C-alpha cells in the first residue's frame, strides 16, 4: 500500500484508493456485484493484470470482497463492502466536480458510469422532477430511477412497478438527456420508446444539465 508519511485523513484515504483505476473500479461496483469479466467490460482500456492487481489491493484494504453466487449460478463476483459503499458520496462529489472539466476528444462511458453521470448532473428545475419512479431498459441492463430529498437515486432492477419506462440504448439516452439529440427525433427513429405515463418519462428526460465542454457543442462521448 502506498504511503505518503502524512497523518491527514485525505492522505490515508489516498493510500487506499489513490492508485490509478481504483476509484473507477469502485464506481463500477456501486450498483451491485459484478464478475471479473463484467468489470473488464466496463473498463475496456484496463489490462486484466492491472485489474487483478487493483482488486487484490482493494480486497486487502477492506473496500471490495469476493463471494460465490449460489445455485443455479456458479460464479464468483466482486462487490463493495460496507466500508467500500461509504465512498459513494465522495464519488458523486468528484463526479459533479469533474463534470465541469472539458470533455476529452475521445473516450468511453460504461453503462454504470452513465448512471453515475445522471446522478451528478440531475437538475429538476421548476418542474420538480418526475412524479414517480422511472424504469430504464438499456439493452440487457435494467435500472430504476427515483427521487427523494437527497436527489436522484438509481438502483439496478426490473422496474415492474414504475410509473413510466424508458426503453433505449446507453448512447441514445446520453444524447437525449444532454440535448445532443431531440427526444422527438429519437422516438421517430425508434431508438427511444416510452411506456406507462408519458409525462413522467418526459419530465425525467428533461431533468439533466449537460456537462461542460470545451466551449462549443462538443462531441458526445461514446457510451456502452
Image (cartoon, helix red, strand yellow):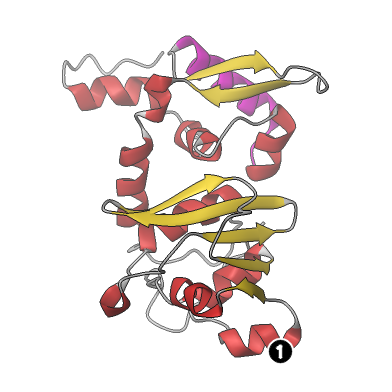
Choose between 16 and 151: the one closer to the eye. Answer: 151
Task: Name the residue at 45% across, 60% down.
Answer: 118
Find the magenta span and give its range. 45-60
Q: Nearer the viewer, residue 51 or 29?
A: 29
Residue 92 shown left or right of residue 198 in the figure: left
Q: Please determine whether, in this image, residue 83 is positioned above or below residue 44.
A: above
Residue at the spot 61% in from the left edge and 16% down from the top edge: 66
Q: Callout 1: few (<14), some (14-19), or many (20+) C-alpha neighbours within 10 Å?
A: few
Residue 37 appears left or right of 197: right
Q: Residue at x 36, y 32 (%)?
A: 87
Q: Position of residue 127 (x, y in %)?
A: 32, 78
**Secondary structure mainly formed by the magenta segment:** helix
- Magenta segment includes 185: no
Picture quadrant where residue 207 is located: bottom left
Residue 52: say if magenta: yes
User: Which residue is at 62% across, 27% downward?
Assistant: 50
Q: Residue 46 at what x, y percent from top left?
A: 64, 37
Residue 89 in percent (x, y) is at: 32, 40
In front: 162, or 109?
162
Compared to residue 8, the image places residue 177 above or below, namely below
Residue 183 vs 16, above or below: the answer is below
Label tally: 1
* Residue 220 visible in the current orientation: no
Q: Position of residue 140 (x, y in %)?
A: 75, 51
Kind of element beneath mark 1: helix
Q: Which residue is mark 1?
A: 188
Looking at the rendered image, the quarter that the N terminus falls into is top left
Which quadrant of the view contains residue 139? bottom right
- Please say whether residue 22 is visible from this viewpoint: yes
Amino acid at each position: 500500500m502506498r504511503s505518503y508519511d502524512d497523518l491527514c485523513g485525505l492522505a490515508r484515504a489516498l493510500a487506499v484508493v489513490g492508485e490509478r483505476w481504483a476509484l473507477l473500479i469502485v464506481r463500477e461496483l456501486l450498483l451491485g456485484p459484478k464478475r471479473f469479466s463484467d468489470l473488464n467490460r466496463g473498463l475496456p482500456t484496463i489490462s486484466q493484470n492491472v485489474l487483478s492487481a487493483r482488486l487484490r489491493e482493494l480486497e486487502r484494504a477492506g473496500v471490495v470482497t469476493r463471494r460465490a453466487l449460489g445455485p443455479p449460478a456458479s460464479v464468483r463476483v466482486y462487490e463493495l463492502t460496507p466500508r467500500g459503499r461509504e465512498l459513494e458520496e465522495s464519488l458523486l462529489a468528484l463526479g459533479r466536480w469533474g463534470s465541469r472539466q472539458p470533455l476529452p476528444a475521445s473516450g468511453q462511458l460504461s453503462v454504470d458510469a452513465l448512471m453515475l453521470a445522471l446522478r451528478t448532473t440531475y437538475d429538476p428545475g421548476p418542474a420538480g422532477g418526475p412524479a414517480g419512479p422511472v424504469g430504464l431498459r438499456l439493452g440487457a441492463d435494467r435500472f430504476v430511477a427515483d427521487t427523494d430529498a437527497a436527489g436522484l437515486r438509481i438502483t439496478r432492477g426490473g422496474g415492474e412497478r414504475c410509473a413510466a419506462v424508458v426503453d433505449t440504448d446507453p448512447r441514445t439516452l446520453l444524447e437525449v438527456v444532454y440535448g445532443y439529440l431531440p427526444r422527438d427525433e429519437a422516438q421517430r427513429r425508434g431508438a427511444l420508446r416510452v411506456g406507462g405515463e408519458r409525462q413522467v418519462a418526459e419530465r425525467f428526460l428533461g431533468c439533466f444539465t449537460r456537462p461542460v465542454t470545451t466551449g462549443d457543442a462538443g462531441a458526445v462521448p461514446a457510451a456502452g
